[in-house]
């Protein structure tokens, strides 16, 4: 995956130098426009990456948008805003761990708000689930949806309660599918040109995982989420069981909200 590429006229991508098991090749930072620049997800506060953003912009950076405030997406925003005087757009960080409290937006976009310039329009699409403050942005001319961590290339995302919510995530996926965008442009990995197929696959994958969880609780009632993981994630490397337990918790909380499961002393049984 190239570190810098032009995806369409007026849309450029820079991959942040933060590759890892969780971020893949790195966080994708997007530049919009040629004369007045908007930056989406400046990523971690790595000086070389922020310098690269300013250099590649080649024009004044007027706006900085973030999809959500996880540490691989938004910490660079505050420093970039100080350096450029750009306006910050996004939803403030919720309470909890793994949140970037340094992100203090100048403007909080309501669902459907459009940042309209002479070169492009970016419409805010609220998509809670992976994070409660997650926002995707639709490029109105291309009809591309920039998805942050709502949909990524080549993998599924962790839903980590209490801020992550599986029920909200599934609902947001269905909403994105209804937009019928021409492409999904993720926060990690390459552009996705078959949105409907990918979204259907993610929803089906999540529902299959939920079915495995129901079967595991039925066969092994009164286990904790930690004890349930090996039953539900047999296809996953045990090294990833810690993250798998977070998504399992999100699934079982969804079952609880649906009236299908209940817990006593953090041990789960079907209703």
Image (tube, rainbow, N blue to C red):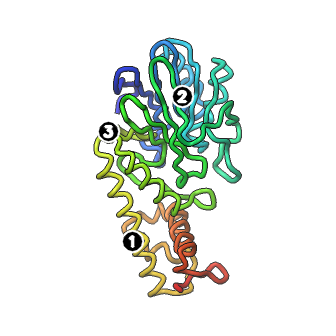
Q: Is residue 262 above or below residue 107?
A: below
Report the residue marked by disc 2. 115
Dot 1 or dot 3, earlier in sequence: 3
Nearest to the observer: residue 173 or residue 242 = 173
| Residue 163 position within the rendered picture, expressed as x and y whole percent measured from the top left | 62, 56
Q: Is residue 178 above or below residue 244?
A: above
Q: Residue at x 64, y 78 (%)?
A: 266
Residues packed near mark 3 inside 10 Å, few (<14), some (14 to 19) or many (20 plus) = some
Report the residue marked by disc 3. 182
Q: Residue at x 60, y 52 (%)?
A: 132
Mark 3 and mark 2: Cα distance apart in space: 20 Å
Secondary-structure class at tag 2: strand
Q: Mark 2 and mark 1 in contact (Cβ < 8 Å)?
A: no
Nearest to the observer: residue 41 or residue 193 = 193
Nearest to the observer: residue 30 or residue 167 = 167
Q: Residue at x 50, y 76 (%)?
A: 228
Mark 1 and mark 2: Cα distance apart in space: 45 Å
């Amino acid at each position: 995956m190239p570190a810098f590429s032009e995806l369409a006229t007026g849309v450029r991508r820079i991959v942040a130098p933060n590759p890892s098991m969780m971020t893949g090749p790195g966080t994708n930072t997007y530049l919009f426009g040629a004369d007045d620049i908007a930056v989406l997800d400046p990523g971690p506060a790595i000086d070389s990456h922020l310098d690269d953003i300013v250099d590649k912009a080649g024009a004044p950076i007027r706006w900085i948008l973030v999809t959500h405030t996880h540490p691989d997406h938004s910490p660079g925003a505050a420093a970039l805003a100080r350096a450029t005087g750009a306006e910050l757009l996004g939803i403030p960080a919720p309470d909890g761990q793994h949140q970037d409290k340094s992100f203090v937006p100048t403007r909080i976009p309501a669902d459907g708000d459009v940042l309209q310039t002479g070169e492009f329009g970016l419409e805010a699409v609220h998509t809670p689930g992976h994070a409660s403050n997650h926002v995707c942005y639709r490029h109105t001319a291309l009809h591309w949806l920039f998805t942050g961590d709502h949909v990524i290339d080549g993998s599924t995302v962790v839903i980590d309660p209490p801020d992550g919510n599986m029920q909200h995530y599934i609902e947001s996926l269905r909403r994105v599918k209804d937009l019928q965008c021409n492409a999904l442009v993720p926060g990690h990995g390459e552009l996705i040109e078959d949105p409907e197929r990918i979204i259907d696959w993610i929803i089906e994958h999540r529902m299959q995982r939920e079915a495995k969880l129901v079967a595991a609780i039925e066969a092994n009632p009164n286990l904790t989420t930690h004890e349930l993981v090996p039953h539900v994630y047999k296809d996953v490397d045990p090294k990833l069981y810690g993250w798998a337990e977070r998504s399992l918790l999100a699934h079982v909380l969804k079952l609880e909200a649906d009236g299908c499961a209940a817990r006593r002393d953090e041990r789960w049984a079907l209703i």
